[in-house]
Amino acid sequence: MKRLIAPSILSADFNNLGNAIEMINQSEADYIHFDVMDGVFVPNISFGIPVIEHVNKIATKPLDVHLMIVEPDKFIEQFVKAGAAIITVHYEACVHLHRTVQIIKSYGAKASVCLNPHTPISLLEDIISDLDMVLLMSVNPGFGGQAFIENTYKKVKQLKALIKKKNTECLIEVDGGVNIETGKQLFDAGADVLVAGSFIFNSENPSDTIAKLKLV
Ligand code: DX5
Ligand code: ZN
């Protein structure tokens, strides 16, 4: 089990985004998490390719791009060229998920699939061996600062069991409502990567908060 932290810039101060990225660069964070929202797949619009392109010029950590969009196939090449190292698409948004995963890999990025809170782990049975990571939503996607959905712990354990059964190296990432308490239980349940937005950026010392999350 890895203990990786991926700060979500959704909760950063966009008037000083460069400062937030420099803080992440200097911190113990492992990835930078970007919540891309189209206002169709989720009831919110966040940011897109220009933000990834600009951040990529100064980022020293891999860009972990979470696509909460419909028809992600149309944008994979652009996001990889903008600097995405990991691309996460939603299971619920992909009619031909196997093909989408192959497209992500063909451009040289790591392929990750995200499950909404209601989507069972069992649906990954025949795609898990093709994945570098699975992202489990522990809130309903669209907004930062929401309450953690407790059923996620069970899903992490189920996913860990599937990964072991299939003997793959797939990572487990969890996103939404992550703090010291939920983070500890998630690592204990078998998660490898914790995404945190509001807990980090609303804290007195975000860099220190990242370091504390790594140690929970
Ligand atoms: C929801 C987003 C958020 C964000 C983290 O669509 O994916 O989960 O990354 O939000 P916090 O950590 O503020 O709950
Ligand atoms: Zn996210």
Image: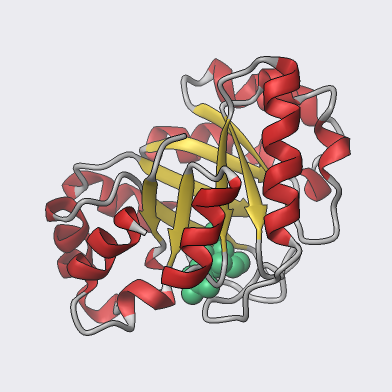
Horizontal and vertical percent position of residue 154: 75, 54
- Left or right placement of residue 168 versus residue 81 in this view: right
> In the image, what residue occupies the spot 78% across and 44% down?
91
Q: Which image quarter: residue 38?
A: bottom right
Horizontal and vertical percent position of residue 74: 66, 39
38, above or below 73, in the image: below
> In the image, what residue occupies the spot 85% across and 52% down?
119
Visible in this render: residue 38? yes
140, above or below 213, in the image: below
> In the image, what residue occupies the spot 54% across and 59% down?
185
Visible in this render: residue 50? no
Horizontal and vertical percent position of residue 40: 75, 66
- Left or right placement of residue 114 versus residue 9 in this view: right
In this view, the residue in front, 153 or 120, is: 153
> In the image, what residue occupies the spot 44% across and 45% down?
64
Specify the quadrant that holds the C terminus: bottom left
190, above or below 184, in the image: above
